[in-house]
Amino acid sequence: MKTGLAHGRGWMVAILLAGGLGAASGAGWAQTGSTAPAYQPKFHGDPARSASEASALGYMRTVIRAQKVYQKKNGKFAASLSELVHTGSFTRRMTQTNRGDYTVSFRSRKDKGKDSYELALTPKQVDAQQRSFYAKDDGVIHGAEDGAADENSPMVK
């Protein structure tokens, strides 16, 4: 097997080119004032504006689905996140209220004599890329750009 100097140089050129392209991409971000590429939607109709929002909305959908399964099986909604563990795809780790850039708020309540719940995710830092979110037992997710979301906030599509 022959490993000549030319073969070694080919790899070196490829590495230098890849490094140069990475640096050029980084320079492009610096020129536009952005530190990262724009958010790429995860699916058709994705309403998220950032990866952080996508994670928050995914968490909300998981809780909403778990509540529906729990309610169908038990005739009532779970009174706490820990009661949802092993329901649908809800895991023990998901009971933690610190969700990266968001904080979870969950409470069980009675709404006009029936079991209900409220779920809210509030960003630790409110900005254009991180709205707050709210849902209750109807499963509709609402979002607000400038403060806490509630059932009167616009529906997230």
Image: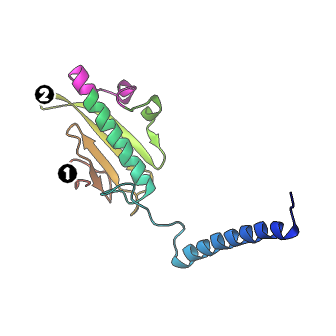
Query: Residue at left 23%, top 41%?
Result: 139
**Residue 58 locus on image (x, y percent):** 37, 45
Number of numbered discs on residues: 2
Query: Residue at left 39%, top 55%?
Result: 42
Where does label 2 land, which residue?
Answer: 113
Classify residue 68 by image quadrant. top left
Query: Residue at left 22%, top 56%?
Result: 154
Name the kind of residue labelled 1 in the image: Asn
Other-residue count near label 1 (Cα within 10 Å), few / some / many at <14 / 14–19 / ≥20:
few
Q: Residue furthest top?
A: 74
Nearer-N-terminus badge (2/1): 2
Instruction: Give above or below for 146 relative to 66.
Output: below
Name the kind of residue labelled 2 in the image: Gly
Other-residue count near label 2 (Cα within 10 Å), few / some / many at <14 / 14–19 / ≥20:
few
Can residue 77 be seen from the camera position used here? no
Classify residue 113 by image quadrant. top left
**Residue 37 locus on image (x, y percent):** 50, 66
Looking at the figure, which quarter contains the N terminus? Answer: bottom right
Does 76 lie within the magenta span? yes
Return the mark for residue 109: none
Mark 2 to mark 1 CA distance (whole Å): 21 Å
Classify residue 6 by image quadrant. bottom right
Query: Residue at left 64%, top 69%?
Result: 22
What colouring does the structure picture have? rainbow
Where disc 1 sits, the SS reads loop
Q: Which residues are magenta?
A: 70-88
Where does label 1 land, which residue?
Answer: 152
Instruction: Give above or below for 44 relative to 71.
Output: below
Can residue 117 be seen from the camera position used here? yes
- Horizontal arrangement in the rendering, residue 19 relative to residue 45 (left or right): right
Where disc 2 sits, the SS reads loop
